[in-house]
């Protein structure tokens, strides 16, 4: 049982201590100021959106698609406020998403294909089998059984692997190759489907790996949206940092300035 009376006292004491601190300091410490700046920056981007008449028709249909309400006649003013209350959050989320995607396409659309070519190797997905083994000798023995005796990788992984692979029969993936440890990533890139790499050390384990399948990245709609977001992030972060720096300078100047009334009194 939790010591609730003591917890209540400590919680009240902590809240009282926070209440005595400057609000700006708390907002910074808790990451709220940064999150607020990000939200405001994204909303400023969404406010830039300009749809063509044809695009507006599609947007009007999409924001209410599958919902028990008619598409809005106009997307001007507080049109979301005219909808049933239980639908407003869903419709606003769709509206925000569609506006942001439009702005990103207008700003970065011409750069997506080049960015995709730069990122294509990292976006490739792989399926492979893996065994984590405690000793080099055991790893070499199992490796020889795999290449000489055509032993089952799945059976050996179930019996010998130290990790979760003993439950999955060694199967890992599909997973983006960029999400893997650099050493493992390099090994997999050197293999063709069906190849088994000799035992190698990774951190505290000896690994045996066989590549099962390699799935090259394709620039579909979902990946295009992801790449547009990637292109946005450096500009967005730079804008947020600039705005926060200016806010902090303004705040520091306000804190160090002498109020006019006090200055007159001192004269």
Image (cartoon, grey):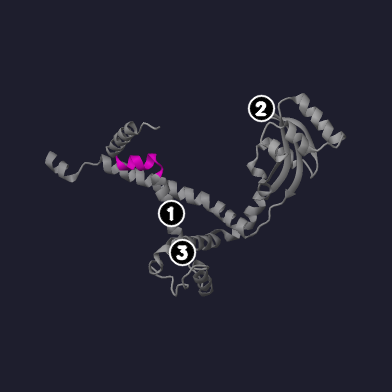
- Where disc 3 sits, the SS reads helix
- Please, is residue 65 above or below residue 207 in the view? below
Left or right? Give the position of 178 relative to 18.
right
| Residue 81 image offset from top left, x and y in percent | 38, 66
Work out whether mark 2 precedes mark 3 in sequence or the reverse, and give the earlier one: 3
| Residue 240 image offset from top left, x and y in percent | 44, 49
- Please, is residue 98 above or below residue 15 in the view? below
Residue denoted by label 3: 91
- Where disc 1 sits, the SS reads helix
Residue 204, numbered label: 2
For marks 2 and 3, give the CA distance: 50 Å
Residue denoted by label 1: 41
Left or right? Give the position of 146 relative to 259.
right
Q: Residues within 10 Å of mark 3 (few under 14, many from 20)?
A: some
For marks 1 and 3, give the CA distance: 21 Å
In the image, is residue 30 part of the stretch drawn in magenta? yes
Magenta stretch in the rendered image? 22-31
Residue 1, numbered label: none
Towards the viewer: 146 or 61: 146
Q: Image quarter for residue 248? A: top left
Q: Residues within 10 Å of mark 1 (few under 14, many from 20)?
A: some
Work out whether mark 1 precedes mark 2 in sequence or the reverse, and give the earlier one: 1
Residue 267 can be seen, yes or no: no
Mark 1 or mark 2, whichever is nearer to me: 2
């Amino acid at each position: 049982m939790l010591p609730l009376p003591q917890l209540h006292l400590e919680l009240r004491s902590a809240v009282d201590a926070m209440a005595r601190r400057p609000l700006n300091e708390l907002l910074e410490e808790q990451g709220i100021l940064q999150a607020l700046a990000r939200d405001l920056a994204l909303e400023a981007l969404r406010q830039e959106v300009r749809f063509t008449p044809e695009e507006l028709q599609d947007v009007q249909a999409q924001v209410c698609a599958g919902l028990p309400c008619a598409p809005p006649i106009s997307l001007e003013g507080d049109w979301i406020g005219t909808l049933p209350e239980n639908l407003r959050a869903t419709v606003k989320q769709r509206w925000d998403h569609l506006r942001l995607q439009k702005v990103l396409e207008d700003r970065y659309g011409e750069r997506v294909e080049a960015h995709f070519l730069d990122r294509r190797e990292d976006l490739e997905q792989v399926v492979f089998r893996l065994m984590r083994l405690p000793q080099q000798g055991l790893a070499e023995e199992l490796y020889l059984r795999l290449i000489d005796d055509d032993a089952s990788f799945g059976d050996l992984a179930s019996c010998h692997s130290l990790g979760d692979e003993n439950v999955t029969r060694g199967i890992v993936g599909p997973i983006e190759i960029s999400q893997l440890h650099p050493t493992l990533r390099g090994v997999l890139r050197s293999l063709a489907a069906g190849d088994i790499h000799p035992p190698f050390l990774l951190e505290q384990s000896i690994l045996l790996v066989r590549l099962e399948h390699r799935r090259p990245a394709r620039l579909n709609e979902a990946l295009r949206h992801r790449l547009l977001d990637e292109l946005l992030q450096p500009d967005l972060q730079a804008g947020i940092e600039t705005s926060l720096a200016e806010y902090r300078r303004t705040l520091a100047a306000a804190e160090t300035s002498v109020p006019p009334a006090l200055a007159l009194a001192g004269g």
